Amino acid sequence: MSSDPITRRVSLLSLLALGACGFRPALTPDAAGGALYGRVTVDAPRTILGFAVRTRLEQRLGAPAGPYRLTVSLDQALEAAALSPAGDTLRYNLNGAAGWLLSGPDGGRLGGGQVDAFTSYAATGSTVATQTAATDANGRLMVLLADRIVAQLYLLDLPA
């Protein structure tokens, strides 16, 4: 596979420009991702959804240990997204929000915020199929929220 010389030059110039503006990868040892990996204990609600978000956060941030504490709160709402002419719900939207707070070794606040996401599922099958779809949608929503929390954590300016 060949590449156009102009495309190669533009790519090289783009990389040089990123380096000149202070860009650094988030997962290097001296960036937030490297400073947090394996050093965060996650506190999430003791529910099925809390377990799902905690599991995903631990997958992304490493084994729970160390001086940092990430506290997560969850909220979700279910709404009908599509109705049949007879008034039956055919599709649901599942909206979720997660508030997060990162505390340092001294208990001081290092960062915090809220992330939002949504997912949906069909309710046109049997009762068992609809319940399975709802359970799967809840799991997908927790993964989305956890990934968005991690993305915000990587933007923090933490000591290495």
Image (cartoon, helix red, strand yellow):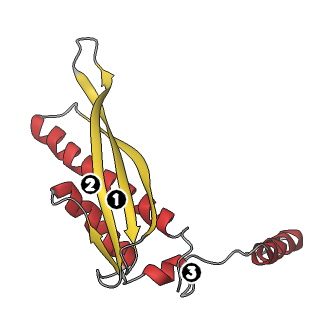
4 or 154: nearer the eye? 154
Crowd class of label 1 (few under 14; some 14 to 19; many from 20; radius 10 Å): many
Instruction: Name which residue type carries label 2.
Output: Gly
Q: Which is closer to the viewer, label 3 or label 2? A: 3
Q: Residue at x 34, y 45 (%)?
A: 96
The number of discs equals 3
Residue name at image x 11 percent, y 35 percent: 127
Q: Quadrant of the N terminus?
A: bottom right
Whether 99 is drawn above or below 160: the answer is: above
Q: Is residue 70 left or right of residue 109?
A: left
Query: Do the residues under discs 2 and 1 have CB atoms within 8 angstroms?
Result: yes
CB atoms at circles 1 and 3 under 8 Å apart? no
Disc 2 and disc 1: Cα gap in Å? 6 Å
Disc 2: which residue: 139
Quarter of the image where one finds residue 131: top left
* Image x and y of residue 111, in percent: 46, 65
Q: Secondary structure at mark 1?
A: helix
